Image (cartoon, rainbow, N blue to C red):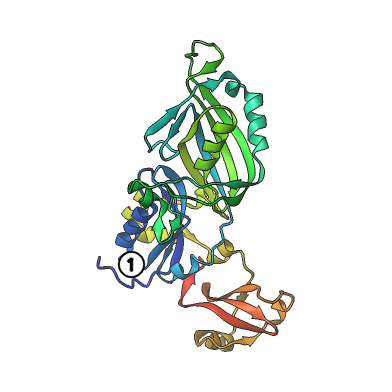
Amino acid sequence: MKRGASGINALIAVDKPLGMTSHDVVSCVRRAYGEKRVGHAGTLDPNASGVLVIGIGQATKLLGLLTLDRKSYVADIVFGTRTSTDDADGEVITTASVPCKLCDRSFAHATCTSLVGVQNQIPPAVSAISIKGKRAYQLVREGKTPELAERTIEIYSAELLDIRGDSSKNTSDLSLNSVTWTVSFEVSKGTYIRSIARDLGHQLGTEAHIGALRRTHAGPVSEKNCISLDALQDRPLDALCTHVLNPIQVLGYPSYNLTTDEFAKVEVGQRFKTPRQMLELSDDSSVCLVRNNKLYGVWKKQDSYLVCQTNFLMGISCA
């Protein structure tokens, strides 16, 4: 199908498979719908799977409005090895013995719990962070060492799910060659789980990297809302019937159903009086404007008026 304007305007969540970049998924969705306007919110590394929110058509304009401030992951933290990328895709650069206490469930549980809170984090060198117009991973490929600034992140929860350790002790009988913790995290936007693993390894006197990573939630969107990429490609129109996300629920803003007169003003971007049921909102609050089960705009309350922030003239499906 020739790519252009397909007339499809929707948000959808795809379960990104392992081994693909987020851009690879976008390319597959473009081909499936014959629509060049496709984008994603929140990048997932190739070795991570799970929730990837996709905007199609005019819904790409929504992606910049989505906060998706909280994200949840299930991660395998492999102790004993540091890699060049802080995940399983990189080359092994350092190995270290693993203290036997890391196999103690009570110790592991307490350690995970201690991670909760606000902290500073240095992102991995191999990341998509832009430094003077270049991605950090591009600088690494050029043999350079990018200087990445600390960022403030928050870990809302860290729950130990499982422990696996090898049976071969080192000669000291006080350490193991490898131990893996499976941990579920809920974190703030911009948090790198790879950095958590790297720093945790150092904190516990060893090395560590991420062996496997799956995003289970992005804001209110969970893996239960996702369609597999294979299913989307096989039956793209069915996917729009069964897996379209309600943009109002994803945005989290209050909604208002437009009258005919108000809709005419919205179409041309003309401000109109704040509806009575929206008067209690504080100034600069965002409101989703809806008509016939489609989202036509996200507007802001200013004094006694609603004014245009972003319009979607073709309407984004709320089904």
Image: 146 above or below 81: below
Q: Is residue 245 above or below residue 6?
A: above
Disc count in the image? 1
Classify residue 215 as left or right of residue 157: left
Q: Specify the quadrant that holds the N terminus.
A: bottom left
The amino acid on which the numbered mark 1 sits, given as a three-letter code, is Glu
Q: Is residue 105 left or right of residue 86?
A: right
Between residue 224 and residue 114, name the one nearer to us: 114
- Relative to 28, is 257 on the left or the right? right
Q: Is residue 201 left or right of residue 276?
A: left
The image quadrant that residue 25 belongs to is bottom left
Residue 141 higher or lower than 252, as above or below: above
Q: Nearer the viewer, residue 313 or 170?
A: 170
**Image point (47%, 14%), residue name:** 168
Measuring from the top left, give residue 113's x and y in whole percent.
67, 36
Residue 59 position within the rendered picture, expressed as x and y whole percent measured from the top left: 45, 68
- Mark 1: give few (<14), some (14-19) or many (20+) Cα within 10 Å: many
Residue that label 1 marks: 35
Please give the name of the residue rendered at 56% of the width and 14% of the height, measured from the top-left corner.
174
Residue 92 percent location from the top left of the image: 39, 31
Nearest the eye: 29 or 285: 285
Direction left: furthest residue: 2
